[in-house]
């Protein structure tokens, strides 16, 4: 209609004004520029996110154990540099790379050096730099860097055995004193322990002072381990490890095996009542099954508890003097069963179950007073299943004494007791037939022969003289 109107008017189709045309073009160009810039900014070519550098945070480095380094960019890495300073101001270009195409997003590097590399001041600085492929920052790309300083420790701890017992009996104890030196001061030391061939660990305590390089530990040869071989293991914070064998003369000791016949009165009395506390007893009515529950399941739980209590050791407590005297818990008593007896139980001539007797049974009169002939701390004072009422005393250096089947106890957990303190009275709580004391000695969780710790000469030769002798060596330097 409009066109028609123009024609009717006889006029030419009017040109749009020139001014208007120019404004239109400019607007179009501006829109294009805005769209283009926006496109560039949102595209990878102008992304402004900096690359990330992740490196293992370690304080001590033995050069061989790799330090993991991970470089990532959300678009692509253009170049990277890993520089290691030798502590002397001299830099080593450890690893670097330049990429022509934007196709690398991740780089993983395990930084390690030959152990022979020398670092002047026992430390090094690791410096990482990365640039990505972005045109951001006036075409320079996004950059990231990270600098970390680590202590270099390539030397293994030095271990020397200073003094030890001459030998050890199967089921018995021994003392070991040793020196550990790492980089002159032991602040770089991470872990020190004694490990046996059967995988048991004994933790030492410092001799003389907390910053001492000298350590002392009691060790035990568990009665059921065929042989005993121990070594001192030391690890530093950089991961360097060394070990040194402990040479103890091994003395075999044979233990009694006894066959015991289970009586109906015993099974229907003590056993039935002890078993009834255990959930397994719901599933059976057999008295021999009850015996197995008591002798195996309940005993295992009770012994696990004894292990947990008697493995506690204060690694930082200085030993200095370990003035232990012979234990003599029940005056005027006689031994009614020995440590280490291997008991096999039969019913109607049929083998039912077995157990090892991990203590010494002593008996005198009923409800006789039980005395501790060494100072210590009461760490447990409860009813422990087959062991009955059982106070436990911590004497230091991982040495514990237990007193089982008590009728009454006269101590509380936390009590510090002295030589001569009456702890409890004998009785027949737990799995005991008559009134007696089951006396057990534990070295860092391992039951050992009480007979050794009741013998003045054995203690002198194997413990107190060993520590005193080592202290003389320490004093001489
Ligand atoms: Zn006993």
Image (cartoon, rainbow, N blue to C red):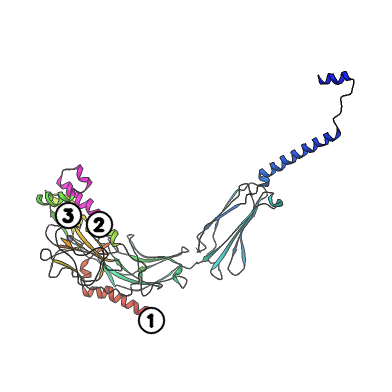
Q: Quadrant of ligand 1?
A: bottom left
Residue 476 shows which numbered tag?
Answer: 1
Pinpoint residue 5: horizontal percent, then vertical percent: 84, 19
Pinpoint residue 237: horizontal percent, then vertical percent: 46, 64
**What residue does disc 2 label?**
303
Closer mark to the observer between disc 2 and disc 1: 2
Left or right? Give the position of 141 relative to 285. right
| Among the two numbered marks 3 and 2 on one chain, the one whose residue lies closer to the N terminus | 2
**What residue does disc 3 label?**
344
Residues under numbered marks 3 and 1 in contact, where contact means CB atoms less than 8 Å apart: no
In the foreground, 172 or 217: 217
Q: Looking at the image, which residue sits at the far bottom?
A: 476
Q: Is residue 234 visible?
A: yes
**Which of the image's four quarters has the N terminus?**
top right
- State the extent of the magenta-drawn residues as a range: 275-301
Up-down relation of residue 164 to residue 226 (above or below): below
From the Cβ of disc 1, is ligand 1 less than 8 Å away? no
């Amino acid at each position: 209609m409009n066109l028609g109107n123009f024609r009717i008017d006889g006029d030419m189709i009017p040109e749009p004004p020139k001014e208007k045309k120019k404004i239109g073009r400019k607007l179009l160009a501006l829109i294009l520029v805005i769209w283009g810039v926006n496109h560039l900014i949102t595209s990878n070519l102008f992304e402004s996110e900096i690359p990330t550098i992740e490196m293992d945070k370690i304080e001590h480095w033995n050069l061989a154990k790799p330090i993991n380094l991970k470089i990532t960019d959300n678009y692509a890495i253009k170049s990277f540099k890993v520089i290691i300073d030798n502590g002397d101001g001299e830099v080593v270009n450890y690893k670097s790379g330049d990429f022509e195409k934007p196709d690398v997003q991740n780089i993983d590097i395990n930084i390690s050096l030959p152990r022979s590399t020398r670092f002047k001041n026992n430390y090094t600085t690791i410096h990482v730099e990365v640039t990505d492929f972005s045109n951001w920052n006036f075409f320079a790309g996004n950059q990231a860097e990270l600098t970390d300083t680590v202590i270099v420790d390539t030397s293994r701890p030095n271990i020397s055995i200073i003094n030890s017992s001459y030998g050890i009996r199967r089921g018995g104890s021994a003392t070991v004193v040793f020196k550990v030196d790492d980089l002159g001061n032991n602040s770089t030391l991470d872990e020190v322990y004694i490990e046996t061939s059967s995988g048991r660990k004994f933790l030492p305590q410092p001799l003389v002072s907390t910053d001492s390089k000298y350590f002392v530990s009691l060790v035990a040869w568990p009665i059921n381990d065929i042989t005993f071989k121990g070594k001192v293991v030391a690890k530093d914070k950089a991961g360097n490890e060394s070990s040194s064998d402990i040479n103890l003369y091994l003395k075999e000791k044979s233990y009694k095996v006894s066959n015991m016949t289970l009586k109906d009165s015993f099974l229907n009395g003590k056993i039935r009542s002890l078993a009834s506390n255990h959930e397994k007893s719901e599933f059976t009515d057999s008295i021999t099954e009850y015996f197995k529950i008591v002798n195996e399941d309940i005993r295992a739980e009770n012994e696990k508890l004894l292990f947990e209590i008697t493995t506690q050791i204060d690694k930082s407590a200085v030993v200095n003097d370990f003035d232990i005297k012979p234990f003599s818990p029940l005056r005027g008593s006689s031994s009614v069963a020995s440590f280490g007896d291997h008991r096999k139980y039969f019913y109607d001539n049929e083998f039912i179950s077995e157990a090892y007797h991990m203590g010494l049974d002593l008996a005198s009169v009923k409800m006789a007073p039980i005395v501790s002939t060494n100072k210590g701390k009461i760490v447990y004072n409860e009813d422990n299943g087959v062991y009955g009422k059982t106070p436990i005393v911590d004497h230091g250096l991982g040495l514990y004494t237990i007193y089982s089947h008590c009728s009454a106890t006269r101590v509380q957990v936390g009590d510090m007791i002295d030589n001569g303190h009456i702890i409890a009275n004998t009785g027949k709580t737990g799995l005991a037939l008559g009134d007696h004391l089951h006396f057990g000695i534990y070295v860092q969780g391992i039951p050992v022969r009480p007979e050794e710790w009741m013998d003045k000469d054995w203690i002198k030769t194997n413990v107190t003289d060993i520590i005193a002798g080592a202290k003389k060596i320490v004093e001489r330097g």
